[in-house]
Amino acid sequence: QLTSSLARQTARNARSVADYDTKFNQRLAALKAAQDLLFDADWKAAPLRDIARSTLKPFRSGRGTGEWISISLPDIELPAQHAQTLAIALHELAGNSAHTGAISNGGGVELTGELQTGADGVKRLHLRWQETSLKPIRKPRKTGFGTIMLLNALPQQFDGTASMSWPRSGMIYDAVLILPQSD
């Protein structure tokens, strides 16, 4: 079901067959990264840090010994569906940055997360993707699959909220994700 949804959404915004093929295969690779982690854990849960590292690996290095994306996330595990959705969302963030954002302009990204437990006992993950570009970045004129994934699908999966902003230094994505209660 998730794979067919990815195929439909990718086709909807593809400019050509070659564009579709490239984008769909990249999204499948992101999904596979999460599924490999889940397979190793009998499909129970996958570590957040490992999801980020494996999904973002194709985008992380390129400056000699430096990295374009730094990752600082709490030590938590996500159930299968949540892990897969997050992997695709992270891929969209990185792909957009590599195409028109900070990474494509010689900048970098900080992916951070903070775990908080409210007075109600609910655990919330505050996730931030902050780009720092060497050139000014503008808000895209069109919205597509990535925007829908980041502002709708991911927050809905976690019963959370998300927002995007475009200061001159680069795009900032903030999400507050409510973590599923463990049994």
Image (tube, rainbow, N blue to C red):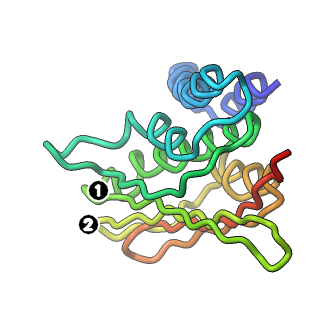
Q: Quadrant of residue 35?
A: top right
Q: Quickly name the residue at label 1.
A: 105
Residue 25 placement, left or right of 77: left
**Amino acid of disc 2:** Leu
Residue 16 appears in the picture as rendered: no
Instruction: From the viewer's side, name the closer residue of 170 and 114.
Output: 114
What residue sits 76% from the left and 36% below the top?
Answer: 81
Residue 86 placement, left or right of 73: right
- Identify the image quadrant of the C terminus: top right
Label 2, secondary structure: give it: loop
- Identify the image quadrant of the N terminus: top right
What residue sits 50% from the left and 24% below the top?
Answer: 22
Residue 144 vs 54, above or below: the answer is below
Q: Quickly name the residue at label 2.
A: 134
Do labels 1 and 2 touch, CB within 8 Å?
A: yes
Label 1, secondary structure: give it: helix
